[in-house]
Image (cartoon, rainbow, N blue to C red):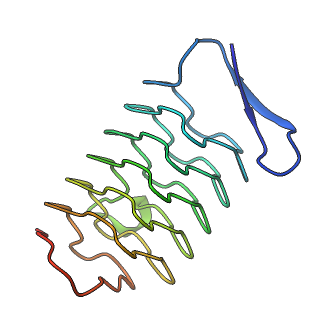
Amino acid sequence: MIEIKQRETGKVLGTFGGDTLVGADLRHMDLDGADFRGMDLSGASLESSDLNQADFTGAKLHNTRLFRAALNEADFSAADLTGAQFGSEHPSQAADLRGANFSRAILRRANVTNANFQGVELASVTMEFANFSKARNAVIPNYKKNLR
């Protein structure tokens, strides 16, 4: 069993019955301030969850679904978000990433269509083939990148 704890207080926010969070169903959960540092959440479903101020530093989120997730001020520093799904053709279905930190993160083939990027930190981010179409308030650093 895995306990998901609050990063500052250590309070248990939720438990998951498996021995890994790969492919976990964590939809519609209140995980405000959760500590996911270094965890593997590949293929997990985090849709419609409250993940404000969650810490994903160094985490692996390959093909993780984050539609409609609240991710204000979440920390994705050095996280691998290859193929992560934040975006949607419908703005109301896209993630809210205001103030999130993606410094040194990998967003290869990630979809952030219509996601709110107001105040997001994208320093030294890798974003080959990322879909930033219609991403709201995104300020993309001026360096070599391959965007769709």
Q: In which quarter of the image is residue 6?
A: top right
Residues 102 and 99: in front is: 102
15 left or right of 148?
right
Residues 28 and 39: in front is: 39
Q: Is residue 114 above or below residue 18?
A: below
- Name the residue: 71% across, 45% down: 30
- Name the residue: 30% across, 59% down: 88
Residues 122 and 138: in front is: 122
The quarter of the picture where the C terminus appears is: bottom left
Residue 67 x/y as whole percent = 42, 51
109 left or right of 87?
left
Q: Is residue 98 above or below residue 81?
A: below
The quarter of the picture where the N terminus appears is: top right
Residue 61 x/y as whole percent = 41, 41
Q: In this view, does 85 lie above or below 147?
A: above
Residue 76 x/y as whole percent = 50, 57
